[in-house]
Image (tube, helix red, strand yellow):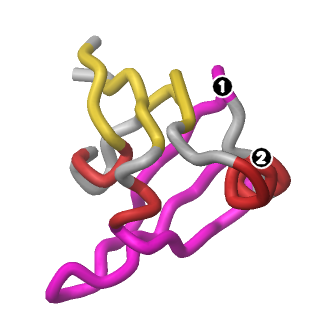
Amino acid sequence: MTMVRLSDLAIGQHGIIEDLDAEGPFRQRLQALGFRIGKEVLPIRQALFGGPLHVRIGSVNVMLRRRDAALIHVWASQ
């Protein structure tokens, strides 16, 4: 397993959250959505032209801006 940013995971590639670079209210928002250390995350779709990333975490589907997804570090499965 290798450490990458959530924004760098391939569609359909599972990852385990290792760290959140976000601070303050945004970090709390991510955690409220389920983005917590140790949780499994799966990118489902990616919008064209650098648009949002559709991610599944547990049973929740979330759309994240690519720059926000880059703040989430994950262990990527091979």
| 40 lies left or right of 3 | right
Mark 2 Cα within 10 Å, few/some/many (few <14, many 20+)?
few
In the image, residue 26 sits, relative to residue 64, either above or below, namely above
Label 1 residue SS: loop
* Residue nearer the viewer, 65 or 11: 65
Q: Residue at x 45, y 61 (%)?
A: 68
Q: Horizontal and vertical percent for residue 38?
A: 64, 21
| 44 lies left or right of 17 | left
For the C terminus, the quadrant is top left
Q: Residue at x 44, y 47 (%)?
A: 71
Magenta stretch: residue 65 in it? Answer: yes
- Residue 58 visible at all: no
Boundaries of the magenta span = 37-66
Q: Quadrant of residue 63?
A: bottom right
* Residue nearer the viewer, 29 or 25: 25
**As shown in the figure, which amino acid type bears the numbered disc 1?**
Ile
Q: Which residue is mark 1?
A: 37
Q: Which residue is mark 2?
A: 31
In the image, residue 3 sits, relative to residue 10, either above or below, namely above
Q: Earlier in the sequence, mark 1 or mark 2?
A: 2
